[in-house]
Amino acid sequence: MILRREFIAGLGGATAWPLAARAQQGGRARRIGVLRGADENDPEAKLRHSAFTQALAALGWAEDRNVRMDLQWGGGDADRIRALAQELVGSQPDIILTGGVPATAAVLRETRTIPIVFVIVADTVATGIVERLDRPSGNTTGFADLEATLGGKWLELLSEIAPGLKRAAIMFNPDTTPTVSVYMPSFETAARALKVVPIRVPVHSDGEIEAANITLGREPGGGLVSMPDGGFLRTHRASIISAAAGNNVPAVYDVADFARDGGLLSYGVDPQDGFRRAASYVDRILRGEKPGDLPVQFPVKYEMVLNLKTAKALGLEVPPSIMLRATEAIE
């Protein structure tokens, strides 16, 4: 885990909020720091940022007019994310928007006073990002993206689309997927019910991704669940998709662009919607509200994307139950 409750408890105590006073000055461009765990060349990650800036502009905050934005990309590298967090906090912006647990945790380590609004964070209390959902306290609030029960949901979907499933690996990077333990209980419960052997597969490189898929594909009945990860797994998604296809391994992912890029099936929240909604909290905090008084919010839009071409290549017959639930089917 990157963060525990004990760490957050250490952030307690009296907190100064210089922002509230500065908000009254007017005439000064407000400074928004943004730290993303993804790669700057990731088209979907750029769309998410664009959704945020457009929503912010609709609330009256436009770049080069009354807002200056410092956008940093971690590229899936935990060490780089930590270094960028230190640099960003050192520049003393008025507020920081973070994407993913590694980026949020890294910024929290560096500041107890600068307001933080997070997006793409799973089970925020269990991961120690906030103490409570209704009143987070401290300098952090935001928009959670996934729930712990989805670990089991992904495995159920995998078993449904690949009915001969016998072994299922849950793939994660220990450095950029600290939430793996959040999903494991529901994943293992579903595995017992489905009589599927659950396997944990930590990966750190393309070579390890390939090796894991070779092992899964060596005998019939292997399948893969790729964990939510705004850093390493997202940056290496082409390798994950290619390795799964090359070894005839059916796989389920948490975000739609994996399926759109050739993965079999995805189920999860609409991440652009989370960034769009985050603009409302940034607006409220820039106008003087405290992040600790704003409750953590949960997803309102989910999507399931099915790649029919990949299903055909894997020799899978897609059941009507999945076809009916898919919000998008790629021919």
Image (cartoon, rainbow, N blue to C red):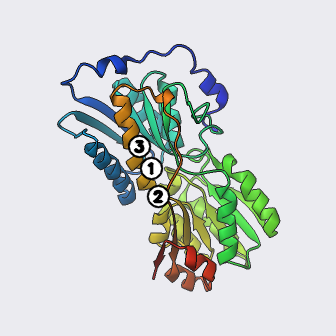
Q: Is residue 14 above or below residue 272?
A: above
Q: What whole-number distance in Å separates the C-alpha atoms at marks 1 and 2? A: 7 Å
**Image quarter hosting the N terminus:** top right
Q: Are marks 1 and 3 in contact (CB under 8 Å)?
A: yes
Describe residue 77's horizontal placement relative to residue 174 as left or right.
Answer: left
Question: Which residue lies under the disc numbered 3?
Answer: 278
Q: What whole-number distance in Å separates the C-alpha atoms at marks 1 and 3? A: 6 Å
Describe residue 98's horizontal placement relative to residue 2 as left or right.
Answer: left
Describe residue 162's horizontal placement relative to residue 22 as left or right.
Answer: right
Q: Which mark is residue 270?
A: 2
Q: Secondary structure at mark 3?
A: helix
To which quarter of the image does residue 63 belong?
top left
Q: Secondary structure at mark 2?
A: loop
Q: Secondary structure at mark 1?
A: helix
Q: Which mark is residue 191?
A: none
Question: Can residue 73 be spotted in the picture?
Answer: no
Q: Nearer the viewer, residue 76 or 306?
A: 306
At label 2, the amino acid type is Asp
Q: What whole-number distance in Å separates the C-alpha atoms at marks 3 and 2? A: 13 Å
Question: Which residue lies under the disc numbered 1?
Answer: 274
Q: Are marks 1 and 2 in contact (CB under 8 Å)?
A: yes
Residue in view at x 37 percent, y 17 percent: 18
**Image quarter hosting the C terminus:** bottom left
At label 3, the amino acid type is Ala
Q: How many marks?
A: 3
Question: Can residue 183 be spotted in the picture?
Answer: yes
